[in-house]
Image (cartoon, rainbow, N blue to C red):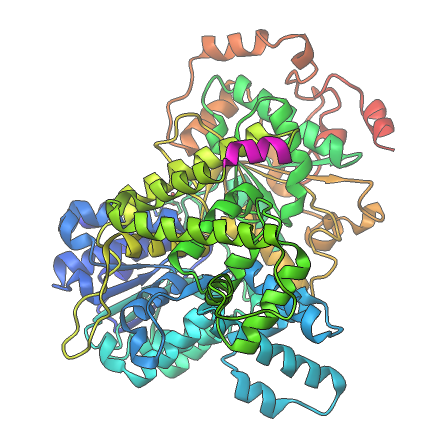
Amino acid sequence: MESMLRGLNATQRAAVTSKASVLQVLAPPGSGKTKTLTSRVAYLLAHEGYRPQNVICCTFTIKASREMRERLRGLVGGDLEGKLVLGTFHSICRRYLVTYGHLIGIPNNFGIADSDDSLGIIKRLQKKIKFGMEPRAARNKISHRKARGQRLDDILKSTGKSMEAQEFAMIFQEYETALATSNLLDYDDLLLKCVELLRKYPQCVSNIEALLIDEFQDTNNVQFGLMKLLASAKRRITIVGDPDQSIYGFRSAEIENLNRMQAYYPGTVVINLEENYRSSSAVLNLAQDVIEQDEERPSKRLKSTHCHGTLPVLRRVPNPHEEAAWLVSEVKRMTRMTGGCLEYADIAILLRSAFLSLLIEKALANAGIPYKMVGGRRFFDRVEVRILLDYLRVISHPDNNSALLSIINTPTRKVGDGTVAELNRASEAAKVSLWILVQKVLKREVSLEKKLSKPAEQGLGELVALIRKGQDKLKTFEPTQAPGKLIELVANALHFQDYLKKQYKEDWEDRWENVQELLLQAKDVTLQSLTAQDQLPEVDGVKQAQVEGSQEVLARFLANVALSTEVEADDESEVKPRITISTIHSAKGLEWPVVFVPAVYEGSIPHSRAEDTSEERRLLYVAMTRAKALLYMTFPIMQSRSESESILTQFLPSNVDHRLKDVGPVFNDQTVQDIATILQRSAPSQELLAHAATSLDESESQFDDIWPADGSPKGPFLNIETDMPTYYGRSAQSLAGAMR
Ligand code: ATP
Ligand code: MG
């Protein structure tokens, strides 16, 4: 027992061992909510006799679920830990649907439409039924409605007479039909169908003794309903969350769910955690100043368990190019000047919008600094990766029209747009999937209005042959090898490397590298997590769908791809340490020693299209509270309409000078020592630091670290322009001049 509670403070222990049937742990970032939740699962299994197959745990990050598995492996043994139902809401729902979906008429080989697929479907609809609504807006609106639990009937019923409303109802209807013909479920469907399943067949979860949920503040209406259903047998629920970190309102998350839960389960016990173990006081204080600008929120202030540390830096730059350049130089300087205490893997760059990464990626690449992208435009969405995955998707699940359409002429096989349109039309007329139709056409069982050209017919024949070959070979592959082998098979058959060379003369090598990375991941995922963990525990009296070896593993691999919210955030097995670039949204729950937040100007954050400024403030708060030791924020003046419109005035309090007296210079013996202490690392020796400082080469010497001799800084940040006039070996005037 003691061993399990080691490393937890008294309040955390109370939460871990609480006998409460419904428990909410509400606390600010870095207070150990996720840690507490993980410990509670272990505690329930090891001390309260819960069996892992009867416990469901919803986590947001892969890191959290990995941590949880590791802890449990030590505590309850590898075999049992594997049975825990662990994952995001979406992946858990998928597992229930794969196992029991047949009860409500969902074939267990359904595919998952990710948001690009959904958009593609709507764009194709627009060609067919001409509507004015912008496809992206239509997709978002559909998702909003579904996230509130509305179905086609509700939409049709609630539709007003206006043209717009009727148009939307029609798009909705057609979209749902398109999904159904392709045997696809979109993200919202995964949740909705699972709700439907559990309403009709509560016995599927009759074994569930405890439900635990992380990041509860970001649950939506449907997820709230799911919570009630999943826990219906024993009503034992633990949730952890933080209303101040609610950042998915734009995707229909409801902060209100915290109160709704208390109302629905009278006797809900609430525990608050009060210490922050993640960030230095300097970082934490500033973040709290930001969130306290929200006047509607009850005031609560955390204490950091760490020393004051280095002040966060706010840096004005002339334009986005210089912003990227400065970031790179600062990364170099930091890794150098801390004598190896900080490395690339310690650094994260968190972005309000994914597109902001372009310049930064370029600058990092030019400087030879390795990085990886998380969230936003994901690895799996890169064109070359996507093509191969779409082949796998068709092999796994040929009725998926979306996937088939995206590869039907890629690489080109003389199947032109006209042909594709004709095939589409015919498949709709015949009410069969495109895959079935194409085969019928090739066998001359169906004739088209516009006959296929010879080359098109040959091209389609080759495609069908390749898909069939993949399907046949798949059966012969060792299950855990299946995804990797199949990717190799497809890439070879398509002469994919030559295709990339021809198609992308400039950067085909990078793209080929991505293909290699995909192969690695396919093999890796297979080995790590695609063993027998997908099957849900046997529940008495409910028939489970049959699981078949390699096909099942392939389907699960593809589902993992579709549902991955992030690529591994801190992969220890990684050979070369890399900087992480992520959207703020995907960084939720994670932490890094060093965090950069570029583009903090009005229009970016708060975003120009954001409806809810307080959500934008919370977003900045989430970004800032990811940092353990060093926090940098930058904004190009050019982007801000005027200086007064930068986030300085939007989000930051004006008089917080009082805390700033004890600030020290950046990267001298003392500050490096502080950083090491916060990170619980050993500090480099003084000789090493001295050497680092003197070994800077010419080009780096302008970043020499000189603290202003004339006293302490004047704002809540190190404002390099005013506070550190010689910081970069240039005078404040020349810097200011450069910025104008
Ligand atoms: P967020 O709201 O950002 O998700 P959180 O409340 O879930 O944050 P955790 O990620 O669980 O916080 O913990 C933050 C950090 O503090 C982690 O590195 C964790 O290991 C550490 N930590 C938590 N509790 C303690 C403790 N009692 N002693 C030492 N370290 C702790
Ligand atoms: Mg957490």
Q: Residue at x 74, y 30 (%)?
A: 322
Q: Residue at x 73, y 19 (%)?
A: 726
| Residue 71 spot, x, y in % from top left | 23, 47
Question: Is residue 528 at least partly visible in the picture?
Answer: yes
Seen in the image, is 455 located left or right of residue 715?
Answer: left
Q: Is residue 198 above or below residue 548?
A: below
Seen in the image, is 157 located left or right of residue 610?
Answer: left
Q: Is residue 226 above or below residue 727?
A: below
Q: Residue at x 64, y 82 (%)?
A: 170
| Residue 359 spot, x, y in % from top left | 69, 35
In the image, the segment drawn in magenta is: 495-503
Q: Nearer the viewer, residue 632 or 105?
A: 105
Q: Nearer the viewer, residue 490 or 284?
A: 490
| Residue 549 spot, x, y in % from top left | 23, 54
| Residue 706 spot, x, y in % from top left | 66, 18
**Number of callouts in the render?**
0
Q: Residue at x 42, y 13 (%)?
A: 685
Seen in the image, is 447 located left or right of residue 274?
Answer: right
Q: Quadrant of residue 252?
A: bottom right
Seen in the image, is 626 located left or right of residue 521?
Answer: right
Type of secondary structure dominating the magenta stretch: helix
Quadrant where the image shows the C terminus: top right
Question: Is residue 266 at least partly visible in the picture?
Answer: no
Q: Magenta segment: does it hold 615?
A: no
Q: Nearer the viewer, residue 475 or 56?
A: 475
